[in-house]
Image: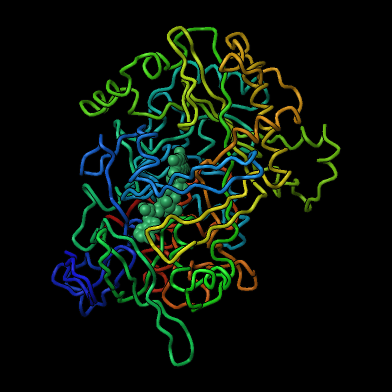
Amino acid sequence: MVQKQPGELQGLQIAGKTCVDVELLYCWPTTSNSSSPQSEGIFLEPVQKALLAHTQLRINNMADKSFDYIIAGWTKNHYGPTDWNIVTPPQPGLQNKECRLPRGRFLGGSSGSNGTICVRGVPQDYDDFGFPEWSGKEMFRAMRKSEKFHPAHWFPHNKKAHGYGGPLHIEPAPALFPIAHNLLESYQSKGLPYKPDMFSTGEASNGCGHAMRTTYQGSRTTAADFITKDKERPNVTIKCDSTVDKVILERGSDGSLEAKGVEYLDNDGNRYKVYANKEVLLAGGSYNTPTMLMRSGIGPKEDLERVGIPVQLELPGVGKNLQDHQLIFTYYELSEADLTDDARVNHDPESYETGSKAWKESKSGWLSTFPFGTFAFARVNDRLEKESKQWRAMNRKPGRDPMGLTETQPNCEIFNTVCYGGPPEYTDFPKEGQWALAMCVFLCGQQSRGYVTINSKDPFEPPFADPKYLEDKRDLMMLSEGVRFANEIITEGAGTKDIIKGSWPPTAKHHLYKTNEEWHDHVSKYASTSYHPVGTCKLGKKDDPLAVVDQHLRVYGVKNLRVVDCSIMPTNMSGHTQMPAYGIAELAVEFIQQENGMSKKASQGDSGELRAQL
Ligand SMILES: Cc1cc2nc3c(=O)[nH]c(=O)nc-3n(C[C@H](O)[C@H](O)[C@H](O)COP(=O)(O)OP(=O)(O)OC[C@H]3O[C@@H](n4cnc5c(N)ncnc54)[C@H](O)[C@@H]3O)c2cc1C
């Protein structure tokens, strides 16, 4: 549909109508030029991806062109053409380690390569955004809207916590290995009560249960599912292999700025301009959306001037306020065989070939699910309060701990792998007769703040991101406390104390660490990204110096320009960020509908009636 010609492109002929619908833009045909009911539905399929120009659509070599991405092809998807290949500068908080920050270049963004875990956080996380439109109640409702939940006979789900009419298939983890159940027993014996569906209900800050997955019948479900497969529709044009350079801005006679469209490039460097009939939505994610704004001349003056971009609008918060949960994998060896999936994943020398064949032929095998077990949220602040004078002396607001969290918010999430596995830097694979797993801990309410910027005007250059991991002492202390608690759970808990041989690899001795301080070196050496960047186009009130968007996600100071992705989150939530990404997109759709006189439709429930009308 898009003619690949350099130069101006004033509109596309889609379904007999002239409109522009190259993902990042949307048109809102008026009744007069709308010839079919579908034309109104252009962004009622809400996920941001429906509205984005995606760069470099590449499909993992085991997937096919129907956007059926393999589930656990983790390492194959990163650090190559399906990744933005962002690497941090040396991180002083991590013993000067450089961290790779994978970001999916799939149609559907990082949902094409993420860990498929659904942990929605707790309502207070969103109440803390500070706007009634973004309350926990609203965000949990919005997240349900995208969901099509598939119950499993073994899983006691909470009916009201799930949605059933959305395009996003969600199910309980299909294959839990015995070690996951051992851990459930250990969590409970260490004071974390079993609340099976707590990661969808948001009911607890201290407890254990099961995290749902964006998978179904052996396939990954992604944001692309909103606009592909059976959801393909004639009024949505998907444009791949395109990189947005900047927003086309025009200044009115009153000095106001208005977004008119975008300039983008194909892979051969041919430049195109497309214009929106209505407005432009940016959804490039927390690393890339700020760079698109900066290349458009919107951002901190010094960042723009450094690379010679004329300032159209000084907006100091663009790229600032970067927050990412720090995650650490800590490994243990088991003394008992066959509680984990190591036999298939690590002992079989042909495991990848075997796994891919099984997935291709029957959507089965170890690559058809991520090897994660059961999950817990833990409040560990009280432990620090009790044991650390330094912690007790930290500043705090009324009702909040030094991390800024209330009692209803967890300090960390803890989960386990069901075999040896993790990011590619971990290569101590167990051999036959050896069985290992990781306790994974990530920090909630992190206090370190980083930034994103550009080092040139080149839109193909990856963003520069410095997350400043663990630079705030509170983060190091709290994450160490979470890891210390996880170590106690696995080494002393009722379900695991008799089957843990010690640390993995056997030369390591971390299972013997006892104090918070003893963990600092381990934590700062091994912590890295949890792949959850947020905050770089902050939602905030007008008087907030770092605010980039208002409560309806409109960029301050520019007409017809919105940001619709995780970059708008002013603070990180205490879970995994894919469900909030869908929630953000669902709420954006409602705002747009309301502004365009469609509030009746927008107020309909969360069961997919809206989509059914299209
Ligand atoms: C390895 C990994 C594992 C993860 N695991 C989990 C998990 O288990 N559970 C969970 O909840 N979350 C997980 N996440 C995080 C989750 O996937 C993200 O929070 C979510 O995808 C964010 O959505 P987004 O729209 O903000 O950005 P993204 O998903 O990053 O989407 C941005 C899109 O914009 C495109 N884009 C960027 N710049 C341009 C440009 N200039 N022109 C055109 N297109 C552009 C990108 O290519 C991409 O397609 C993981 C992420 C990663 C990377």
- Colouring rule applied to residues: rainbow
- Residue lying at the far bottom in this picture: please name it: 253
- Report which quarter residue 378 is drawn in: top right
Q: Nearer the viewer, residue 319 or 407?
A: 319
Q: Residue at x 62, y 27 (%)?
A: 193
Left or right: residue 174 compared with residue 27: right
Q: Position of residue 470 (x, y in %)?
A: 66, 43
Q: Position of residue 180 (x, y in %)?
A: 50, 21
- Report which quarter residue 444 is drawn in: top right
Instruction: Quarter of the image for the C terminus: give it.
Output: bottom left
Question: Is residue 578 among what the camera can see?
Answer: no
* Residue 607, above or below 177: below
Left or right: residue 203 compared with residue 396: left
Q: Position of residue 552 (x, y in %)?
A: 49, 68
Question: Is residue 471 among what the camera can see?
Answer: yes
Left or right: residue 92 compared with residue 563: right
Q: Residue at x 52, y 71 (%)?
A: 304
Q: Nearer the viewer, residue 418 or 248?
A: 248
Instruction: Quarter of the image for the N terminus: give it.
Output: bottom left
Q: Residue at x 49, y 62 (%)?
A: 454
Q: Nearer the viewer, residue 188 or 544?
A: 544
Q: Position of residue 182 (x, y in %)?
A: 54, 16
How many numbered discs, if any? 0
